[in-house]
């Protein structure tokens, strides 16, 4: 008996039901053609996605591929920041580029980032998680919506793809399958781009750190001055990040000696450049202005009106009368230096005014301290007084004064080294480390 042949004009895969009508056969052929086209596209897409390490360009490519192959009108691709528990986007197609950040769990995209589940809606307005604010602000009407996670090889969600308004239809299972296949290639490319971006950022930071250190080394005096009436010592220690700590010594006249300790807000090249401007202005005005009030006023005006800075600094300047052993000073919001007396209570040098760089036209009040042989002036930055131990306790001024008293009979350099050693021991096990300037001036 002759076996019956297959009367269906379309060959089907083993186990698949044969199309019952010519229309179904044509649809099956069309579906196979679409699947084959998308398969070929994915092969080419993998090559394209791995041809760039530029993250913004890569995000644009992924979004373009997703839109063109699903017929979506608009879309967004969010990256997941697990550390900050946020999703963020560099691109919103059809609108100007800007960064959008949302907490994980908020809205449909945030929910998908949190759960890793696909959301496919024929009408987004039926889902309570959908935020209509976008539509209201831009005069848009979102109807169909497809949102799915982009997962890496470890099945960790690294991104969220959200597409809006498929033309002439709703998003279907074919779209989901295609985008999930695309997401595999996308996740690999995104990981490579992320690592590249982090590498470039590390290189940029290392270059900036090297430049900042170079600037800072050029600003700080090589050694303190040698004076008959005073024994002067200073020590500077930098942290891993270059901060804005600064100190200087000047001799405006044969009978006077000027010392400065300052701390610029911020770190890196920006802080180093402000220090550079501070030093140039200070050296210029100290040669022409003969009052501390005038010097500090000019420095504040210069910093306030500097278009590039937009930073503030704490600042202490002391003018020593070498013959009369008197100290005139102005403290502009800095850690108060202390005069440790041979007898009696220490004197904290607080007179002055607010920090430099915030408001123009500020006036500063001069302070004065009479010095006696054996007195020690201690000046520092907050890296000394705010050094913290494992319990979070700070070193504070009292410990600095106690260390100076314990070594008061020694030279100024030994006093400085003793204080720094105690700070180092105190902050061992702590988590906050900052630049440190420690200065001592001992009256002979």
Image (spheres, rainbow, N blue to C red):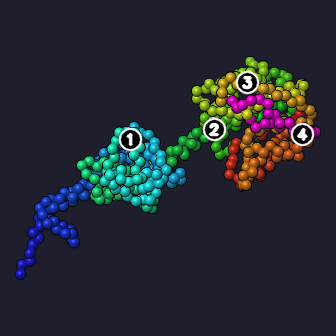
Which mark is in front, 3 or 2? Answer: 3
Q: Choose the circle earlier in sequence order: 2 or 1.
A: 1
* Position above or below: 413 against 179: above
Q: Give the spatial CA distance, label 2 vs label 1.
A: 40 Å
Q: Residue at position x 58%, y 39% from top?
A: 208
Of the residues tagged 2 and 1, which is closer to the observer? 1
Q: Is residue 335 magenta?
A: yes
Question: Which of the image's four quarters has the N terminus?
Answer: bottom left
Q: In the image, is residue 414 part of the stretch drawn in magenta?
A: no
Marks 3/2: CA distance? Answer: 25 Å
Q: Could you tell me what secondary structure mostly forms the magenta stretch? A: loop
Q: Which residue is mark 3?
A: 363
Q: SS of the residue at dot 3?
A: loop
> Disc 4 or 3, which lies upstream in sequence?
4
Residues tagged 1 and 4 counted as in contact (Cβ below 8 A): no
Which residue is label 4 attached to? 345
Task: Decide which of tag 4 and tag 2 comes sooner along the chain.
Answer: 2
- Asked whether 269 or 64 is in front, the reply is 64
Left or right: 347 as drawn, with respect to 207: right
1 shown above or below 42:
below
Of label 1 and label 4, which has the lower sequence position? 1
Query: How far across and how far down the image is residue 4, in percent?
Result: 8, 75
Q: Which mark is residue 136?
A: 1
Q: Judging from the image, what secondary structure is the residue with disc 2 in?
A: loop
Instruction: Judge whether 183 appears above or below 367 on screen.
Output: below
Question: As rendered, which of 305 and 41 lies closer to the eye?
Answer: 305
Element at badge 1? Answer: helix
Kindly report the distance in space between the C-alpha atoms of the residues bearing marks 4 and 3. 29 Å
Q: Residue 266, which numbered label?
A: 2
Q: Is residue 352 above or below residue 290?
A: below
Count of labels shown?
A: 4
Taking the image as drawn, is residue 324 in sight? yes
């Amino acid at each position: 008996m002759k076996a019956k042949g297959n009367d269906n004009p379309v060959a089907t895969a083993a186990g698949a039901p044969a199309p019952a009508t010519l229309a179904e056969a044509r649809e099956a052929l069309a579906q196979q053609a679409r699947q084959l086209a998308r398969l070929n596209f994915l092969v080419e897409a993998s090559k394209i996605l791995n041809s760039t390490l530029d993250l913004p360009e890569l995000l644009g490519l992924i979004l373009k591929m997703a839109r063109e192959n699903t017929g979506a009108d608009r879309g967004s691709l969010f990256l997941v920041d697990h550390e900050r528990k946020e999703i963020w986007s560099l691109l919103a197609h059809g609108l100007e580029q800007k960064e959008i950040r949302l907490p994980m769990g908020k809205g449909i995209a945030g929910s998908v980032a949190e759960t890793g589940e696909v959301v496919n809606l024929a009408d987004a307005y039926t889902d309570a998680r959908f935020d209509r604010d976008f539509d209201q602000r831009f005069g848009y009407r979102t109807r169909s919506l497809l949102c799915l996670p982009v997962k890496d090889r470890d099945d960790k969600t690294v991104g969220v793809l959200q597409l809006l308004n498929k033309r002439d239809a709703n998003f279907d299972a074919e779209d989901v399958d295609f985008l999930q296949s695309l997401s595999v290639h996308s996740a690999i490319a995104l990981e490579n781009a992320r690592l590249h971006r982090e590498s470039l950022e590390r290189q940029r930071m290392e270059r900036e750190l090297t430049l900042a250190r170079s600037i800072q080394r050029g600003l700080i005096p090589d050694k303190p001055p040698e004076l008959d009436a005073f024994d002067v010592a200073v020590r500077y220690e930098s942290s891993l990040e270059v901060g804005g700590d600064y100190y200087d010594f000047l001799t405006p006249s044969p009978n006077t000696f000027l010392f400065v300790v300052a701390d610029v807000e911020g770190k890196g090249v920006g802080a180093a450049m402000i220090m550079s401007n501070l030093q140039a202005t200070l050296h210029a005005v100290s040669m022409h202005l003969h009052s501390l009030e005038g010097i500090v006023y000019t420095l504040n005006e210069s910093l306030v009106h500097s278009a590039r800075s937009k930073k503030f600094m704490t600042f202490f300047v002391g003018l020593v009368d070498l013959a009369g052993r008197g100290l005139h000073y102005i403290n502009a919001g800095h850690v108060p230096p202390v005069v440790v007396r041979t007898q009696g209570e220490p004197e904290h040098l607080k007179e002055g005014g607010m920090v430099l760089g915030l408001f123009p036209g500020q006036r500063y009040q001069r302070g004065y301290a009479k010095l006696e042989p054996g007195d020690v002036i201690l000046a520092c930055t907050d890296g000394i007084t705010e050094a913290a131990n494992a319990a979070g306790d700070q070193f504070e001024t009292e410990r600095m004064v106690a260390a100076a008293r314990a070594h008061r009979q020694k030279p100024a350099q030994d006093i400085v080294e003793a204080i720094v050693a105690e700070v180092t021991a105190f902050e061992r096990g702590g988590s906050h480390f900052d630049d440190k300037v420690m200065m001592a001036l001992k009256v002979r």
